Image: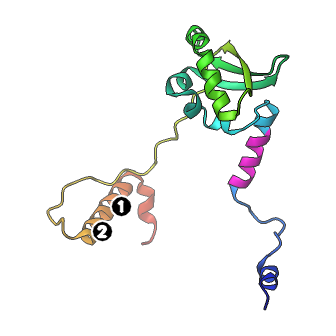
Amino acid sequence: MSQSAKKARTQVAPRRGWARPLGADATALTDAALRRAGFPDPSLVLRWPEIAGPETAKLAQPIRCRMGPEGMVLTLRCEPGAGVFLQHETRTLIARLNAFLGAGAISRIRIVSGPLTAAKKPPAHPFPSFPARADPRAGKPLLNALNRLADLRKELLRREPSLKSQPD
């Protein structure tokens, strides 16, 4: 059997109504939103701390990229009071951006003062952490794991009395 016949037989057409990986839709939607904001490359926003440096990334975030009369203008939102620092760093920042995007991609940086949006921390995990106790039976990893599991179950039953009614 030829190689092309095998490929044709193994390829399956996508079915309607089946769930797809979230990453497939999220990437396309994020890319479209960043392109509407004028960013030539979405990784400029995603990799901002690497491109601008950690100090500058703490003070400023890219919010828009537009074509101006002299070239592309990148608009940065910065912490109130950090505009003076960023003004002194514009040449260095433009050089770093052009090294990432290509020569002459960014010609000017516009600085807008305003509050930065911080990434939200995920909520704490609802289950308690495993107890970190020193076990004299250190040479028996399976027994130690079972003991930690029993301790965790006791802790959960203590916190949630409604779980006691469930069969084992």
Task: Please tell me whether residue 90 is drawn above or below residue 25 in the rendered image.
Answer: above
Residue 75 placement (x, y as % from top left):
72, 20
Outermost residue to the front:
103
Helix, strand or loop for the magenta stretch, by majority: helix
Residue 57 numbered mark, or none? none
Residue 64 position within the rendered picture, expressed as x and y whole percent measured from the top left: 75, 25
Residue in front for this viewpoint, 137 or 150: 137
Task: Identify residue for label 2.
Answer: 146
Q: Say whether residue 51 is magenta.
A: no
Residue 83, can we see it?
A: yes
Quadrant holding the C terminus = bottom left
Q: Secondary structure at mark 2?
A: helix
Q: Residue at 73% across / 42% down in the picture?
A: 30
Within 10 Å of disc 1 (Cα), the crowding (few <14, some 14-19, many 20+) is: few
Badge 1 is on which residue?
Answer: 153
Residue drawn at x 38%, y 56% as measured from the top left: 156
Residue at 18% in and 56% down: 134
Task: Name the amino acid, label 1.
Answer: Arg
Query: Which range is magenta?
Result: 23-32
Which of the two discs, 1 and 2, sits closer to the camera?
2
Q: Name which residue lies at 22% across and 54% down.
A: 133
| Image coordinates for residue 68, horizontal then vertical, percent | 83, 19
The image position of residue 9, as x and y in percent, is 80, 83
Q: Where 148 sits versus 159, above or below? A: below
Of all residues, the one furthest to the bottom in this rendering is 1
Hey, what amino acid is under mark 2? Leu
The quadrant in which the N terminus is found is bottom right
Residue 119 showing in the rendered view: no
SS of the residue under disc 1: helix
Report which quarter residue 44 is drawn in.
top right
